[in-house]
Amino acid sequence: MSELLKQIGETTNNAGARLGDTILEARDLHVIFGTGVRAVDGINLKIYRGETLGVVGESGCGKSTLGRTLCMLEAPTGGSVALNGLPISDMKGSSLREARKSLQMVFQDPYSSLDPRQRAGEIIGEPLLLAGVDKKQRQSRVNELLDLVSIGASGYAKFPREFSGGQRQRIGIARSLAANPEIIICDEPVSALDVSVQAQIVNLLVSLQRKLNLTYVFISHDLAVVRQMADRVAVMYLGRIVELADADKIFAAPRHPYTAALLSAVPRMPTSSAKRKPISLPGDPPSPMHLPPGCRFQARCWLRQKLGSPDVCSAVDPMLSGTGDHQAACHFQEHVDAQRGAQNA
Amino acid sequence: MTIVPSIQRRGVSLLPTSIRSKPGLAVAIAFLVLIVVVAASASFLPYDAYRQDLLHRNSPPSWNHILGTDELGRDMLARLAIGARVSLVVAVTSTVAAVLIGIAVGAIAGYKRGWIDSVCMRFVDSMYAFPDTLFAILIAGVVKGQLSQSSTDFFSPITALYKMSGGLFGVFLTLSFTSWLVCARIVRAEVIILRSAEYVAAARLAGASDLFVMRRHILPNCLPVIIVAATFVVPSAILLEAGLSFLGVGVDPPTPSWGAMIASGVRSMQSYPHLLITPAIAVGLTLLSINVVGDALREHFDPSFRRGGEAS
């Protein structure tokens, strides 16, 4: 569990639920598309109340599919998802709709995520409309939400096209908050925005989390943003989680060669003491339709090359292992941190 | 800071400005209004469209008969006006019917996908395989044959309707039956795009049912393409009606329709060209006008064309 949560301790959220409880859990989750693509290939994941779990990985690694499957927008082909202990992956129709009310999503594209024919007030008020809140209460709640995301009540009657990208994303966030969710899945919420606007949205999300005791799953390919937001980080590669740990640990000492390569690609100030050349990964990820036997990262693994291509990498598919708060799916995870320093020495 | 007061350009207020900047559109709208007025007031014209005057057959335009008379001495302007009514009524009603069927089939197929989609679309494809006009003639022939002769109880109300409308009802059935295909395809394609929009996902997460998503998000956003589809269907229905009447499987004589008038005009086009030219020009200009207006509507209804009122 993260430092933040330990500090907060046992603050209670709604209805006796305590910070640190498991709020969302995925067990052996699989999503295989009709084309044979294994977008999510056996993921076990627990998300604790009040934390921010960052999910990182390159595009196509299945992180967005994971996000959509966690809220059952995409039906898993195997495994289960439980929200507050309720198996939402087994539910359908109205019972599913009822059960996942406490789970909302903030989307990547601030253009396609708002209906162009509706005014901001209608967009934000839609979850309330669906919950059967009457018109007057809806309006006052929407105005409250507009203030909360710093748009102001003047935005109520405007159409999405009258807002900037950042403002649209604020409206999307306000909509996700309308029905008092406990957990919000943010699918690359800032990657379509300008850098200056990104910071504002990240700050907004952080302050909302403090105010409303929210839990976030923060999906992103931007390590800098994840570092700022996340308490724990899950690194995905080809549909699997290859490393899962507290944020400070993963950024200080990664235990998977892929994570090490990702971290080395983050630009640093030239004055930074730890000067490292980026580790470049040769080639592309293998096709998610035809995975090689053994470790799915082996063909591009710099560590394997360094260790003289041990047989175990191409024979045994490594599972997540390690201590409770730092797990990696690598046979040689103890060597990663030392070797990545030596890489460019 | 801008000092210019922001002008709200939204909804209805947009039309006059776009008309001012497009003289062609204004002319087209004026022409369509004229046609509608003429069609609506056909009964008040000084001449009866059905009264024959065999002494003044095939007379060229004159002060008595502004557009001349036809081969039975009937006033061409009166016939053209009644013909406009026939053509427009049958085209518009069959377009409405076709669009409604098309929306229903296209929306269900596009939203549900899977086998429902396959069944619907293979059916549409197989209907599509017939050339439009040929198919229309086939249906028209069957409909006409069945409806004008059938005396069974089941068909008798339809037969009565058919006879009462001078064959119009048969044309209506034929046109709706051939035109919904294109609507179904267009609507389906749009629904497939819209159903994966993130605002649809957001609505579903908030607990929206399929019906809610369809009514509130998908169909309103389909409106531009539905209007586009309608502006394609109306002129083709007019054309098809004219074609059917031209071939003798449309409205029954003596009911005038533009197609029937062109058909009889062709027979004497060498000696009395005005019998052919007037209805032909009427059809041509009407189709052109509808297309021009259709283009303008498409621009107007597509949000991406619209300028934001007060975007900074």
Image (tube, helix red, strand yellow):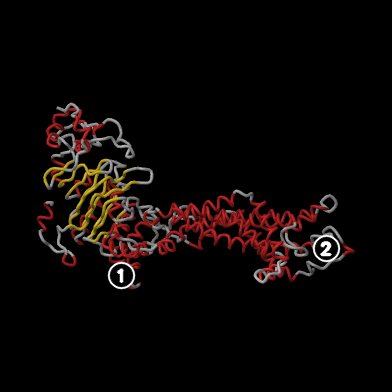
The residue located at (29%, 42%) in the rendering is A61
Question: Along the horizontal axis of the image, is A86 left or right of B69?
Answer: left
Question: Along the horizontal axis of the image, is B210 left or right of B78?
Answer: left
Q: Looking at the image, which is closer to me, A227 or A233?
A: A233
Determine the secondary structure under disc 2: loop
- Image x and y of residue A279, in percent: 21, 32
The residue located at (21%, 49%) in the rendering is A44
Q: CA distance from mark 1 to mark 2?
A: 70 Å
**Dot 1 falls on which chain?**
A
Determine the secondary structure under disc 1: helix
- Are both tags, 1 and 2, on one chain? no
Q: Looking at the image, which is closer to me, A270 or A30?
A: A30
Considering the image in quadrants, where does the N terminus of chain B appear?
bottom left
Evaluate whether residue B5 shows in this view: no
**Dot 2 falls on which chain?**
B
Question: Along the horizontal axis of the image, is A259 left or right of A108?
Answer: left
Residue at mark 2:
B63
How dense is the environment of label 1, judged by Cα within 10 Å: few (below 14), some, or many (20 and up)? Answer: few
